[in-house]
Image (cartoon, rainbow, N blue to C red):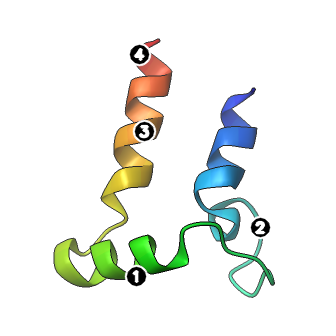
Amino acid sequence: MTHSELRYILDPHNVYEPDFPGATFRVLKEKETKLYGEYCTRQLVLEVWDEG
């Protein structure tokens, strides 16, 4: 798996346009954005990926 593929799995809207018709973890993203102002899971997973 590549970094771009992982980004796509975590948040297709981050890779494509915001009106992209699909979403993988829509509820999680909405909840985290509401609570923390950002999609924390995506950020944490990508940080760990980059370290590995």
Q: Which residue is mark 3?
A: 45
- The tag earlier along the polypeptide, 2 or 3, is 2
Q: Amino acid at mark 2?
A: Tyr
- Compared across the picture, whether 9 is left or right of 10 comes to right
What is the secondary structure assignment of the residue under circle 2? loop
Query: Where is mark 2, residue-wise?
Result: 16
Circles 4 and 3, Cβ within 8 Å, touching? The answer is: no
Image-based side of 10 in relation to 35, left or right:
right
Residue placed at 75% from the left, 26% from the top?
1
Type of amino acid at the residue the image marks with label 3: Val
Tell me what residue is drawn at x 29 percent, y 72 percent.
32
Judged by depth in the image, the label closer to the viewer, 1 or 4, is 1
| N-term mark: 1 or 3 | 1
Q: Which residue is mark 4?
A: 51
Which of discs 2 and 1 lies nearer the camera? The answer is 1
**Vertical position of residue 31 compared to residue 6: above or below:** below
The earlier-in-sequence mark between 4 and 2 is: 2
Q: Which one is in front, 34 or 24?
A: 24
Q: Position of residue 25 (x, y in %)?
A: 54, 68
What residue type is disc 4 on?
Glu
